[in-house]
Image: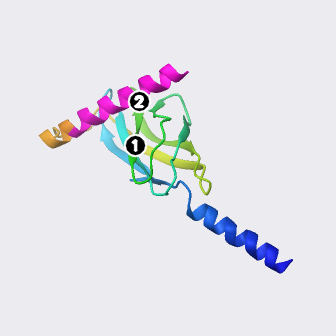
Amino acid sequence: MKKLIAGIALFGTFALASAQTITFDKTTYDYGTIKPNADGTRFFTVTNTGDKPLIISNVKPACGCTTPEFSQDPIMPGKSAKIKVGYNTAINGGFNKMIEVFSNDPANNRSVIYIKGTVDANAPEPKPLTPAEQKAAAKAEKKAARQAKKVAAAK
């Protein structure tokens, strides 16, 4: 009996070791202090650090002031994808919002990411993006739009 239990435990360890694994570039995005109606769009990078395809099945914000966009396309091992998160910056005051990310990661099928910050009319003007930052933002925006179209077409 002991050998059977040890064998099952050992197999379970190997099964988890050879699975899809979700990893985030950050788990909290701090907007800092921003002006009302400023751009509330931010991106989280998700990387599959496992050896099987990772699928994000749902991204669920805690409230209607936060809108996520994501693709359900498989993220292959070693590859990354973006989760686009928008916050309604017309709402004044501080915010700290939770967003749940559901995936097929057997060890962590529910991950939590956060956005926080303050919307204040007296906030300083944002510094302009560098050309490299503008290019990266435009590329991420185009990719998120393509992924959103795929998700909408699949529904």
Q: Which mark is residue 81?
A: 1
Q: Which stretch appears magenta?
A: 136-155
Secondary structure category for the residue under label 2: helix
SS majority, magenta: helix
- Quadrant location of residue 120? top left
Q: Percent position (x, y) of residue 141?
A: 31, 31
CA gap between label 1 and label 2 equals 10 Å
- Please name the residue shown 40% across and 43% down the image: 81
The total number of labels drawn is 2
Q: Do tag 1 and tag 2 residues touch (Cβ < 8 Å)?
A: yes
Seen in the picture, residue 52 relative to 155 is either above or below; the reply is below
- Quadrant location of residue 118? top left
Q: Is residue 30 magenta?
A: no
**Residue ranking furthest to the left:** 131
Horizontal side of 65 relative to 128 (left or right) equals right
Q: Percent position (x, y) of residue 68?
A: 46, 33
Q: Percent position (x, y) of residue 8?
A: 75, 69
